[in-house]
Image (spheres, rainbow, N blue to C red):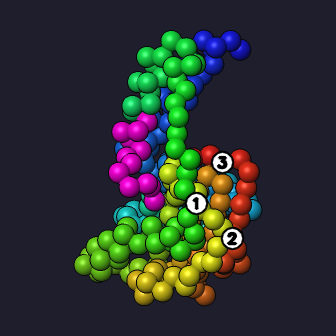
Amino acid sequence: MDDSDYLRLLTHQAEQANAFLSNARKWERERWMCQRLLQALNVSHRLEEFGAAEQEPPDVLFREANFEVFYVLDEGRRLNDEWRAEVERRRSAFSLSQLVRREAKPRRIGAAELQARLAPTLRKKAHNYSERGLDTGELDMLAFVSLKRVVPDFNSHFPPPTEFLRQGWRSLSLVGPTFARVLFAHPDAPDFLRTNLGRSVLFDVGISL
């Protein structure tokens, strides 16, 4: 494969990522995030086991799980805008050297800071669902973590998720390009979440958006 072929491949990959982030593929995207968690937890599954709820929340149904998915991003990042710009950048490039850019070294953060980044979205959802009369105790929350400016240190201490427990969720998990963790899971949560409670799963090959 020469440089021009590789450049076309990179452009095609960016176009695929951009299309994947469209509103039309929202449920497919949310299902993929759930699959990433299941793969990390070594839970075998088939596509036909996933379903969409008649009314959201939840976003994705899988066996006894009611997954409600949300993003955790660096402040100011918007994935749709980011990938649209990347498509144009790759389309307009004439050589691979034009795609090279320097990125600042990510800052290492502790588990407490990583966990704190879930708080704004969870507070908002808990408030909105309460106003709508929805039972948060039936939802398995899944945070899809896509951070470029920081890298979590999983050797650091995870503090008790007290605030999130008070909000009443049945379980709370997070998954990122190279990690997954079930932060908490109540006794009525799915077995595959409860058996992995408090265990950080780290893997080498990362796939993210």
Name the residue nearer the viewer: 15 or 158.
Answer: 158
Q: Secondary structure at mark 1?
A: strand
Give the labeled residue for mark 3.
206
Image: 203 above or below 154: above
Amino acid of disc 1: Arg
Q: Which mark is residue 171?
A: none
| Image position, residue 183 (x, y; %) | 58, 76
Give yes or no for residue 74 being in the magenta stretch: yes
Q: Residue at x 38, y 41 (%)?
A: 80
Query: Quick one: label 3 or label 2, which is nearer the N terminus?
Result: 2
**Along the horizontal axis of the image, is 9 left or right of 148?**
right
Q: Dot 3 surroundings within 10 Å: few (below 14), some, or many (20 or more)?
A: few
Amino acid of disc 2: Asn
- CA distance separating discs 2 and 1: 11 Å
Q: Secondary structure at mark 2?
A: loop
Q: Which mark is residue 155?
A: 2
Q: Secondary structure at mark 3?
A: loop
Chain part drawn in magenta:
72-83
Give the labeled residue for mark 1.
108
| Image position, residue 160 (x, y; %) | 55, 85
